[in-house]
Amino acid sequence: MDEELLELQRQFEFAQQVKSSVRLSDRNVVELVQKLQELRVIDFDLLHTVTGKEYITQEQLKNEIATEISKLGRVSVIDLADTIGVDLYHVEKQAQDVVLSDPGLMLVQGEIISQTYWDSIAEEINERLQECSQISVAELAGQLQVGSELVQSVLEPRLGTLVKARLEGGQLYTPAYVARVTAMVRGASRGIFVPSNLSALWAPLQQLVQQMNGSSGVAVENAFFQSIFNRLLKEEEMLGSLRAGTHWTPSVFAVAQKECVDSFFSQNSYIPYETMQKLGISQAVQFLQSRYPDGKPLSAVFIHSSMIEMLDSTTEDAIEQNSWIDSLSVLPASFTSQDANKILLLCPSVQSALKAEKALILAESYVISSGFIKGIYDQIEKDAEAFSIQASTASLIDHPSKSSESQESIPANTDKGSKKKRGKSASMKTATVETVPDDEEEARPKSKRNQKKGRDSSSSQKLDAKAGGKKESVKAQEGNNFIPPDGWVMKKIVDSVPEFEDEGMENPDSILKHLADLMRPMLINSLKERRKKIFTENADRMKRLKDDLQKKLDESFLNMQLYEKALELFEDDQSTSAVLHRHLLRTTAATIADTLLHDLDILNNLKNGIEVGDSKAQDSVLLESSERMALAKNLNGSLSRKALALVEALEGKRVDAFMTTFRDLAEESGLALKKLDKKLERTLLHAYRKDLISQVSTESDPVALLAKVVSLLYIKAHNKALQAPGRAIAAAISHLKDKLDESAYKTLTDYQKATVTLLALMSASTGEEHDCSADRILSKRELLESQMPVLRSLVLGDSQPQQS
C-alpha cells in the first residue's frame, strides 16, 4: 500500500513538472473546478484567496494559521488575514477552531496568544523583578496592551516557577522584598503595647518603604501589610487579639488590663464603667460578667454581692427604727441615683419592706419607713386643716372684693370733724329717741350715691356680663383654694425634718419634691373628706339660721315700714324731714341691716365649708361702717354688689333708697319680706301704742318722757308711729299745734324748752366743786319732775286731746 502511494506521489509530481503544450486560461480553470465540484470529483470546500487567482482548502488555512502562531506566539487575526491572503471572515472562523482544538492557545481581544508567549513574558518579568524588586500588574498590562485581570490570571500559575515573586494587591514582589517588609511589620507590631488601630500603623510604614525604594518605588497598599500581619499572627510570631480586622490589642496590655481590674474590684468590691473605659475596655458589662459571674451590673458601676449585704444591713436598721436613709450617703461617690435604686431593689430587707408596705423608695436613693412618713403626715395634716380654713376665708375676702372693685366704685366716708360713739339702739318694739340739743348731733358726710342712674345701670349690666363669663373659672379657682400648694407642703416637711433643707425646694428630683408629691394627694383627700363632713353639718345649721333670720326680718322690716310712713307728715319741711330720715337710718334701719349682713356672712361661711362657732342668738347686732363694708365684700357675686349698695344707702339720707336696696338684698338672699298692709298696720300701731303707754306710765327720766309722749300724741292724732331724735322734737311738737288745744300745746312747748335748758346746763357743767351750775341743774330737773304728771295726763288722762 505504501509503495502504491509513493508511486502515485511520484506520478503527481511528474505531472506537475511537465510543461503543458496547451495552456488554459483562468476562466477555463475556474469553470473546470466548478465542473469537478458538480461531478462530486472534488468533495471538499475550496476557499478563494483575496486575489481570486488561488484556491485554498480550510485544512490548509488552519495549518497556515497554526504555523504563524507557533512562529510568533502572539498573532492578531487581522494580521493573519493579510499574511495568508484570505478573507477575514474565514480567518476568524478557522482561528476559533484552532484555539478550541489547542488548550495552549487563547483568543483575547482579536489576538491569538500561546502559552509559550506567556512563558517568555514571565521570564522577562522575572528578570525585571530582579532589578527593581516590585512591579505593578497594571504597569505590565499597559505595556502588553492587555487587561490587568488577564495578566494576573496568567502570572498566578507561574508564580514560584518562572516568576520568583509574590503577587499581593496588584503588585509583584520579590521574596527578598517581602522578607524585608515582613521584618518591618513584625518589628512595628511588636513595639505596640496599647490597643491600636493598624491602619494608623501602616501609614508610617508606607512612608518608610517609599523612602527605601526611592523615586522609582511603587506605593505599597495597606492590604499587603495587613496580609503579612495576619500571616505573622497565625504563625504566632505576635501575641494579642485582633478585632474587626484592624483593632489590635497586644497580649501584654490585656494582661495588665486584667490585673488593674482585678486589683480595683478586689479592694473596693465595685468598679465604675468609666474606669473600664479608661482602661480601654469598651464592652465593660460583658467583660466583667464573664470574669465575675457572681457580680451585679448596675447603671454606672459593677458591684460585688458584698456591697448588697452592707447596704441591706444599713437599710434594715433604718426601717426598724421608723427612720429614713439616703443610700447615696453610704455608697461610694461613683454611684448614681439609678445605681442606688437598683442596688436597693436587690436588698432582701428592702424587698420584704416594700412587699409589706413598711417602707417606700423615693427619689431613687431614699428608703423611708412608713412610720416615719405617717409621723410627718399627721403633723402636716393638722397644719393643712388650719391652712384650708385660712385659705377659704381669704378667698371669700379676695374674690368678692376684686369683683366689687371692678364692678362699681364705693366711695369711702370721711369725717372732717371728730367722730363720736354711736349710742345704743333700742328694740324694735320701743321708740328710743335721743333728746340731745341740736349742736350735739353731728351731721354725717355726704355720700356719692346720687350719681347718674343711667351710668350706674349700664356699668352694672356690663359687670354682670363679665361676672357670668368668668363664673366657671372662679368656681374652679375657689375649689382649689383650700388645697395647700407644693411649696407649702415642702416647707412643712423641712420644718419636721431639717436635714432635708439642703436638698433645695427648686430641685425637681429632690426628696422634698417626692415627699410632697406623695403627701399632697393624701392631704387633698383628707381635706375633701373633712370639707364634705363640714358641708353636711353646715347644711342643717344653714337651714336653722335662715329660718331664724326670716323670723327676725318679718317683724323688724314691718316696723321699719311703719316708721317710714310717719315721715310723710314732714315732706313739706325739708330740714326736719332730713333729720328724721337720718335718725331712722342710724337707728332702726342700721339694726336690721346689721342683722341681715351678719347672718348672711355666717351663711356664706357655712356654705363655703368654713367652720363657724356656735354663737348665742342675739336680738340685734351693732356694727361699725367699716365692719359692714367688710361683711358686704365677703359675700359672693351679685350678693356682694347688692350688700355694698345697702351699706351705701344706709350711709345716705333717704329711707326709701335704703328700703329698696334692703328688699333687693333680701330677695337675692332668698328671703321673703312682708309688705305692710292696712290690717298689719293697725295691729302694729295698737301694739306700739300699748307699749308706749306702758313706758310712759313707768318712765322716771324727765328727759326721756318727752319723746315718748310726743310719739303717743302722733299715734292719736295721725295714726303714725313717729321716730324722732332730740333735735327734731321741737319741729314735731310744732306739727301738733293744729291737733291739740292751747293748754296742751303750751305744756308741751314749755316742757320741751325746759328739757333743752337742762341738757344745755348738763353739757356746760365742768363737774368741779365751785361750779354753780350744779344747783341750777338740780332745780331745773326738779321743775321737770314736777311737770311729769301734767305731761303724762296729755296721753294717759281721761280726756283725749282736742282737735281744732
Image: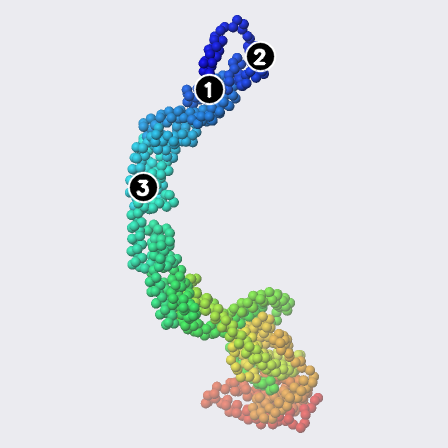
Q: Height in image: 1 above or below 625?
A: above
Q: Height in image: 584 above or below 452?
A: below
Residue in the foreground of this view, choosing between 689 and 434: 689
Read off the residue under disc 3.
Answer: 235
Secondary structure at badge 3 equals loop
| Image location (x, y in percent) of residue 666 | 62, 76
Q: How far is the residue under mark 1 from the one under mark 3? A: 54 Å
Disc 1 marks a residue whose amino acid type is Asn
Q: Is residue 284 left or right of residue 537?
A: left
Q: Height in image: 439 above or below 225?
A: below
The residue at the far top in this view is 21
Asked whether residue 584 is in view, the answer is no
Tell me where residue 673 sits by quadrant: bottom right
Residue at the spot 63% in from the left edge and 79% down from the top edge: 577
The residue at the far right in this view is 804
Tell me where residue 622 sits by quadrant: bottom right
Q: Height in image: 138 above or below 59?
A: below
Classed neighbour count for the residue bearing mark 3: other residues with Cα under 10 Å, few (<14), some (14–19), many (≥20): few
Read off the residue under disc 2.
Answer: 31
Q: How far is the residue under mark 2 from the one under mark 1? A: 27 Å
Classed neighbour count for the residue bearing mark 2: other residues with Cα under 10 Å, few (<14), some (14–19), many (≥20): few
Secondary structure at badge 2 equals helix
| Image location (x, y in percent) of residue 443 | 56, 77
Residue in the foreground of this view, choosing between 70 and 173: 70
